[in-house]
Image (cartoon, grey):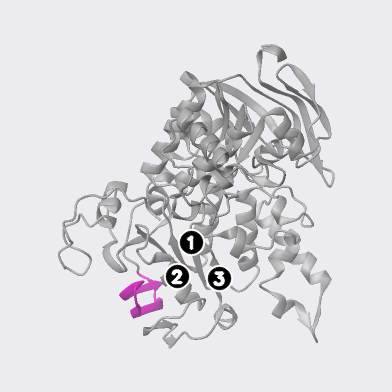
Amino acid sequence: MSEKDNLLFMKGIEKSFSGVKVLKNVDLDVTKGEVHALMGENGAGKSTLIKILTGIYPKDGGQIFYNGKEVSIESRHDAAACGIAVIYQELSLIPTLTVAQNVMLGKEPGKFGLLRRREMYRNVQELIDRYDFKLKADAVVEILSIAQRQTVEILKALSEDASLIIMDEPTASLSAREAELLFGIIEQLRTKGVSVLYISHRLEEVFRLSDRLTILRDGQKVGVLKKNEIHPEEVIRMMIGKDLNIASVSHNLRKPETEKVLEVRRLCRRGVFNDISFAVHKGEILGIGGLVGSGRTEVLRCIFGADPYESGEILFEGKPLKGAPPAVIQKGFGLIPEDRRTQGFVPLLSVERNVAVASYDQLTKLGVVSSKKERHIGRKAVKKLDIRPANPLLQVGNLSGGNQQKVVLGKWLMRDLKVLLVDEATAGIDVGAKDEIYRLLEELAADGVLIIVVSSDLQELLRVSTRILVFRKGKIFKEFNEGMVTQEDILRAASGISGVDAEGTEGSQNGLKQDRLE
C-alpha cells in the first residue's frame, strides 16, 4: 500500500529519551473511513507515537504523510491544521458552559466584538443532527453523563473538520450502556468517512470495532492484523512475546489459616456505608467487588486514615488503628489510590523522587535528605519492578500508565510493608502489565504482606483473591471463600441477586441492573 492510499502514513518513526530508544523505526498507516486499533504493553511506545503525531513530542527520525503529502507536525496547532484531533481519558471540557459554548470555544462567530449567539447554537445543533448524536446544543455540560461529555469532545473535533480522531482508552470510565452508545458513534463516524485511531487494552472492543490492528512491543511494530486475524491468544502473544499461563486466570478461593492482622468492626459513615465488619489475615489477598456507590473505595480510605468515619473501630495487630495517613504509614500501611494520576504520584518529579516521597522520614537526618539514599532506592525500584524506560531520572508523567502504577507500588515496597491497600490496581493497563502487577502482589502476599484489592474487573478479582467480599449499597452483601466462583456469581451478588449471604441472611431479589461495576 503506497503512501497516497492512506489518510495517515507514519514511516520509520524514531524517538529516544535520555539515550533510551522508545520508538525504533515504527510504521503506522490509517486509511480513510477506517477504525484502526493500536495496542501494546505499557511502555511499548503507543503514547509516545501518538504524542509525536499530535505535536507534543518532536520525532528524532522518520516521516509523516497526511493525505499523500509529507507534513511537519511540531505543535498541536500543526496537527489540528492537518485534521488530526485527540480525545484523551481526561476530558478537557468546562462543566459550567453549554455544549455549544464548549464546542465553539475560541472560535465563536461574531462581528465588531459582538457574539452571534443564535448562529453559534444553530451551527452546533446542525452538526449534532448531521451525526445523529443524542445531544442538545444548549445543554449544560455538567449535567451530562460521561458518555455524552465524550460526544461533546468528538463534536469539538468535527467542528474543526477533523478527518482523523484519536481515541485514547475511551471506555475506561463508561458503563456498559454508555460504551454501546460510543460504539454507535464510532460506526457513524466510519460511515461518514472519518477515520478513528482507537487505543485500548480491551480486546473485545478492538475485535468488535477495528478494521485493522497494529501491535507494538518494546518500541517496535511487531505486526498488523486484519479483523478476521484478531484472536485474543495471538494478540496477547504478539504483545508480550510469550504465552500467558491459562491456569493463572482462574483461582481457587480458600478460607484463611494464618493469624488475623487487620479487623474492621461495625464501621459506619452516614450515607456512604453502614455496619461494615470483616477481618483480614497475614499473607491474604482479600478482594472487594461491588457496584458504583457501594462504599468500597471509601472503606479503604477510612482504613488508611484519609477519610473519617462516624462509628465502629479498626484494629491492627489487636490494637486500635487511629490517626492520619502519616501515622498509619509508620505502622506499615501503603495505599495505591484509585486515581493514580492525581493522588498516586507527582507527574513532574522523577521516578526516584516519587519512589522516595513516602520514605523521607527514613532518608532524612537533621532535616537534610540524603541524595545518595534517594538515588539508591530509585535504582532499586526500577530494577525490582522492571520500570521502563530503566531511567530513575525520568519524569513519571512521561511514563506509560503501567509503569506509572509500578512507581506508585514501588514507593511502598521500599518500606517495611505490612498492609497494602490497592484500589483499581490495573485500570487502563494492558494485559501484559496486569500480569506483572498480579505477580508482584502474589509475591508480597507470599512474604506475609496483607493485601486488600478493590477492583471493578471481575476476572481480576478471581485472578488474585483468596477471598472476595461483595459490597452492595454500603453493606457487605456476600462473601466468597471456598471453591470455584465465576464472574457471574460476583455480578449477581453485586446486583442483589443471590441466595444466602456469608452470614446467613437472605439476599434481596432485585432485578439484575445494568449498572457498571465501579
Query: Which label is found at residue 300?
Result: 2
**Dot 1 and dot 3 residues touching (CB under 8 Å):** no
Give the quarter of the image for residue 340.
Answer: bottom right
Q: Earlier in the sequence, mark 2 or mark 3?
A: 2
Magenta region includes residue 259 = yes
Q: What's the amino acid at mark 3?
A: Gly
| Helix, strand or loop status at disc 3 | strand
Q: Which residues are magenta?
A: 257-284
Label 2, residues with CA under 10 Å away: few <14, some 14-19, many ≥20: many
Percent position of residue 125, x then y? 49, 36
What residue appears at the point 60 percent right and 40 percent down from the top-left corner?
41
The C terminus lies in quadrant = bottom left
Q: Is residue 238 above or below residue 87?
A: above
Where 503 falls versus 60 (above or below)?
A: below
Task: Check if mark 2's residue and mark 3's residue have beta carbons within 8 Å.
Answer: no
* Contact, mark 1 vs mark 2 (Cβ under 8 Å): yes
Please name the residue that numbered disc 1 is placed on. 423
Which residue occupies 34% across, 77% down? 270
Q: Which residue is mark 3?
A: 334
Could you tell me the amino acid type at mark 2? Answer: Leu
The amino acid type of the residue labelled 1 equals Asp
Does label 1 or label 2 sit earlier along the sequence?
2
Residue pictured at 52% horizontal, 32% vertical: 127
